[in-house]
Amino acid sequence: MRNLSRETLLVSLLFLLLASVFFLPALVPEFRPVLGVDGNFSIRSVRDGWIDDGFEGWWTPYWLGGSGVFGVQTWTLASRLLDPGGMLYGLCIASWATAMLFTYLLLREYRLERGPAVIGAAAFGFTPHFVTLIYPVHLTVLSAPAFIAALFYFITRWTERGRGVLDRAASALAGGCAWGMLMNEDPQRGLYFSFAAAAYLLFRAWSDCPDGINFPSRLRAAFGAGFWLRAGLAAGVMLSVFSFELQRQAGGKNMAGGVTTAGTRTEEAKWQFSTSWSHHPAEWIDLFVPGYHGELSGDPARPYHGTKPVSHNSDAAGFTVCFWAAVAILTGVRRDSRVRFFAVLSLLALLLACGRFWPGRPLFQLWFQLPLMDRFRAPVKFMSVATFSLSLLAGFGVQYFSEAFRRDRTRFLALLRNGLVAIAVAGFVGLLGTYAFQPDLAQGFGAQLGSAEAGAAAAKARTASLLRMVVWAVLVLGAVWMTIRFRDRKWARSAGVALIGVVLVIELFAVDGFYLRRALFKPDDFYAQGTVLRFLNTQKEEQAPFRVAASLKVFHGGQAIPLPLTPYRGRYVTYHFPYYGIETMENTPQSRVAAEYRSFFRAVLPGAPQKGGREMFRELLERNIRFWQLCNVKYVVTDGYLYGLSRQPVRLEPLLNENPALEKVAEGEDLGGRGHYVYRVQGALPRFAVFENVRVQPGPEEVLSRLADEARHPARTVLTETPLTSAGAVNGTAEPRAGRVIESRRGYARVRVDADRPSLLLHNARYSPDWRVHIDGVRAGAVRANYLMRGVLLPEGRHEVEFRFAPRPAFRGLASGAVFVSLAAAILLGGAGGWLDSRNRKNRSG
């Protein structure tokens, strides 16, 4: 136990130090903006989306409650009490250190020495593919690496022969927690790793058979009771994933964010959807030559020029990782079944990532035939499985390198050295050829990217990527050569492994730096306020809460499709509006997949335009004005044009100016120095409005039908499907009155209202059971109003109403995290390290 505590503690401190150094720019005040935007904004934006959409919209609890200790929900709750930015950086460090710790422990379970295990763990922790997944503000995958490593580690412990019943039970339960939290944090990658984990369970059953027996006997042993137990568990994992996805589909939700009307699509449409975002085999070179096809979309210095529609993150593992993984495959594929398993797993994942492209197309067609797989897209996410496997194999490769000295395998060392020389020479020749033909490359990339400047930048980026690969090949060659040169010294083997580890860490830090440096900027510059932002911020401080629109919307293909009113809509909605706390009625993440959003949009929005001309645009504008009035959209931001209907923007300013429901209240330069206007929407419902005229409908379909009635003015009546009185309605003639907002912030509001008679207070925000309502300090029940919003019945008189966001499922997530941490701590501090040391000593003495 003492050995375990010492080893686990020392390794944990090492990984915490590495993660802290890696995220050091985020801890220094002058460099606090990192990971796409500054940390305060990042975690605040997730928290705000959680509040706006309701808990069930962002985190659907899986087995044992979902997210847990490294889940964003836990850290979001804590950010209410502590600095949100500090919580984000703490989450990054803790998640990355935990991922490396469990990968290290997994490799130690495989009997790897400490040095190679540390290298394999660092390879996984800082693999560019996983690090850059968090760009931009992609917080829901922050903890995925930790849960991936923990899942495989606890499966290995559970299936290890010779362990006690309690040890195996605790490992199985901890592995289940890790799986549930992985599925909750990143469902699609969780699904892919669920298949990998199921295959790993079956592999462990096969590999547990005694050595030295013939194949028929091994087959009988493998298919004994232990096999069927694990096969049953693997099938249970898959069935639970499928059954839960079926429930989500029945509720109109979809893991991948795609459309859920699969029954109305043709087979070709399903195939095109499922294979969108496929990984072309030509881009496999990016695995070990990061940046060969460009890096981050939107960066003019390193534009992406591959086949995917956009590349927000790297698909690279790094040269050092790929090299040592190749060494492991070439050296150990015959002698070690674990190397064979992860080599096959990485190959299958690489092929499946190809999606519609050869040579992976036939395999993906088989995958596509599985139930529900036509509902998922982005085969490129299989690269996560491949990268995890390659990182583990890299640890094996360094282990074989270390063993070569002990066994005096001079030929192996010479081949290793000569192979590195050949790679370095080939890379140098390729670099010279690329540099020689750079003008032609620039011209070709320019034609592909539509800009001569972008083409020149892409050509330079390719040259730079090859140069970096040559540099790392030379550095690894230097480490190997120095180790071989001094192999007669006692310290040579340890020093060589340590030097390889240093080269690996420097490479991964440097490669990741090219991606994360793109995200480092000063908020005062990036979020500089122009006329629009200054005006909206002033109104936000002086008025009750309101929303802003930056697009017209049409309902098409089961979704609300935004037609931007400014070319900077994405930047406004993604960055500037959330940064300044300006609320919008633009599509939230759940509005693309939740059934109630789709039904609401179908009722109140126009369909796709069927004809052109001025009248068509006038009708489109009128329907959106009714939508804005209904949803508390008080201001519209535009540059006077409509984008997205054709290749050329349509001038919409004359129609905006002549519409009596719109009043131009501000104009001036804003983002990009472009002229923008702000229009006020007349007749928009306030955030809190007291209605005497309440119409109760028999059900939700009738509510939607009334909402779709163009003759009905949205500001005169409120609709609900919940009986409010014995008569079934509250009838009145007075116009709705705005409540006096005493206090309002995300997740909390306190309003003072006057009701001359029994009325309904409409809180113009999405209904969610996670909100609690109190009238004059007494708990009251919330009802659905206008199908999507929330409301509360008021008795006659003056009242103070309090709305508070109090998500119950969060505590299930916290409980899941507590169970996971308790089990993991009990296992790790209960003898694993000492057990490993004693087992190794016993093996050596035997």
Image (spheres, rainbow, N blue to C red):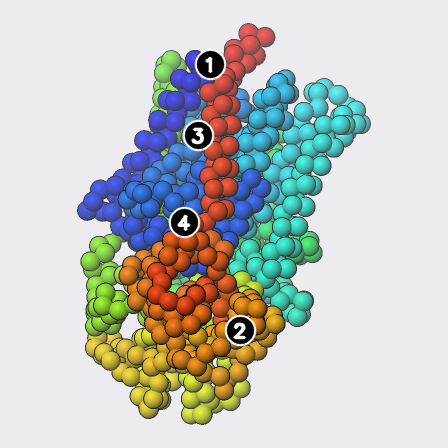
Residue under circle 3? 101
Q: Amino acid at mark 1?
A: Met
Residue at coordinates 54% horizontally, 68% vertically from top-left? 725
Contact between labelled residues 4 and 1, with CB atoms less than 8 Å apart: no
Tell me where residue 315 appears, x and y as whole percent.
45, 49
What is the distance, in whole Å, between disc 4 and disc 2 at their CAs?
45 Å
Discs 4/2, front: 2
Q: Amino acid at mark 2?
A: Ala
Mark 3 or mark 4: name the one nearer the start of the chain: 3
Discs 3/4, front: 4
Mark 2 lies on a secondary structure that is: loop
Q: Nearer the viewer, residue 80 or 449?
A: 80
Which numbered marker is on residue 539? Answer: none
Residue under circle 1? 1
Mark 4 or mark 2: name the one nearer the start of the chain: 4
Q: Nearer the viewer, residue 474 or 519?
A: 519
- On screen, residue 400 versus residue 778, left or right, reads right
Contact between labelled residues 4 and 3, with CB atoms less than 8 Å apart: no
Residue under circle 4? 139
